[in-house]
Amino acid sequence: MKNKQNGGRFVAAPVGVPAGGMDKSPHDIRQYWTPERKKAAVPAPLIASPGANVPEAANGEPATDPKQADLSKMPFTAGGKLFFTMDGVDYVASGNIFMHRNMLLTAAHCIQDNKTGNVGENYVFEQCYAGEDSSEDFYIKTVALKENWYLVKDYKFDFAIAILDKNADFGEPLRYSTTPDVVGKTVTSMGYPVKYYDGDQMMFAKGPVSTRAGQEGHWIMMGSQMGPGSSGGAWVLEDNLTVVGLNAYIVNSGEKIMYSGSPQLNDDFEKLYQYALTLM
């Protein structure tokens, strides 16, 4: 897979192109993702860096198991499960339709391995996935992310935007905000952690947003047990519409997740969004 780079700032790549160089049609990808292959797919990594700074509040914050989402209500209606292949391994993750009916927000680590630089393939997004059912499935034509995700390897760049092959047919998509003043506000984290219902059901958890000491460009959420499989799932404010982050990494203490982290949707994200508009 060869990436097309734009001005040294962004990476755009068509993801329906396998190593043999022939385009994969939606039919080809649908045939690839048999029920058995979906069931065997492993969660995209949701990893914390060693020696991460731990807020003092983490020691007393109770862990909260997520609850099952009502897919008929926002923000969950805009969410779904993301299937893809990277370096020969089949993965599952999460994503959300936002801003436009054919635009998807997910984590950069679900698109590009920041160690090898390889981009995934066989992408299918299943909106409102619940077991083997979903309201609609989509195929990704093009993805866009910051090249610093690979060059700098910092989770503050762990966001990506994908262009879907058609428009979703539902109510208003999610929107995003780059407003920095979200500390202390409650967000809903959503996605498909495999620990619950084997990853077959969308789950959500609520918690306050804080900052991570010594790490600019990061938000953290205390106490939530959203784990592997929820990568790329949005963090949404209490208006159930505005995205301010997404599931990027976790910090563990034994078997419990102390906190989860997200890149801030800042000016870097705004520039990526404007670039993604040129790919539609």
Image (cartoon, rainbow, N blue to C red):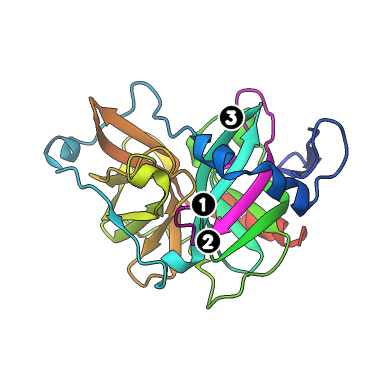
Left or right position of 109 against 66: right
Q: Secondary structure at mark 2?
A: loop
Looking at the image, which residue is at 28% across and 39% down?
259
Of the numbered discs in the image, which one, if any, rests on residue 81?
1
Image spot of residue 182 (x, y percent): 34, 59
For mark 1, give the secondary structure.
Answer: strand
Outermost residue, left direction? 60
Question: Residue 276 in magenta?
Answer: no
Q: Which residues are magenta?
A: 108-131
Q: Of residues 266 and 259, which is closer to you in this image?
A: 259
Q: Which mark is residue 134?
A: 2
CA gap, disc 3 and disc 2: 36 Å
CB within 8 Å, label 2 to label 1: yes
What residue sits 46% from the left and 51% below the top?
A: 233
The residue shown at (77%, 60%) is 278
Mark 2 or 1, closer to the camera? 2
Observer able to see residue 111: no
Q: Can residue 180 be spotted in the picture?
A: yes
Rendered image: mark on residue 152: 3
